[in-house]
Amino acid sequence: MNIVAFAVALDRCIGCHTCTVACQMEKGLEPGVALIPVYTLSGSRDVPLGVYPALYLDYVPRPCAQCQKPPCVPACP
């Protein structure tokens, strides 16, 4: 039995959604279907948290971990 797992360095995620696009292209998914959605801790896209000038924006990708050789891993910066 092969177990596939990978870790995401959340401090390096810039919210570019390249992992999502790579997965969509590899799997031939329809537009709008994402097996790797990228969330923000604020709950909505690109709305920073904190009080000015100490604003921050944390992205959290949620990979599906279904592929043996996931296309999202090399695509991630």
Image (tube, grey):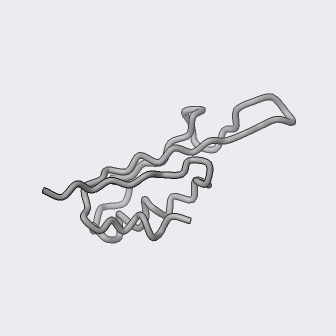
Horizontal side of residue 58 vs 26, given as left or right: right
State left or right for residue 45 relative to residue 35: right
In this view, the residue in front, 6 or 55, is 6
Residue at the spot x=54%, y=51% of the render?
9
Q: In this orientation, does residue 27 appear?
A: yes
Q: Position of residue 71 (x, y in %)?
A: 36, 68
Which is nearer the eye, 28 or 68?
68
Indicate the quadrant where residue 44 lies: top right
Picture quarter with the C terminus? bottom right
Against 73, is 53 above or below?
A: above
Between residues 60 and 31, which one lies in front from this camera angle? 60
75 up-or-down from 10: above or below: below
Q: Residue at image x 35%, y 64%?
A: 24
Q: Residue at x 42, y 48 (%)?
A: 37
Give percent across and percent down for residue 57. 67, 41
- The percent coordinates of residue 74 (x first, y second) are 45, 70
Question: Does 28 appear above or below 32?
Answer: below
Give percent across and percent down for residue 49.
70, 32
20 relative to 10 in the view: left or right: left
Name the quadrant of the N terminus: bottom left
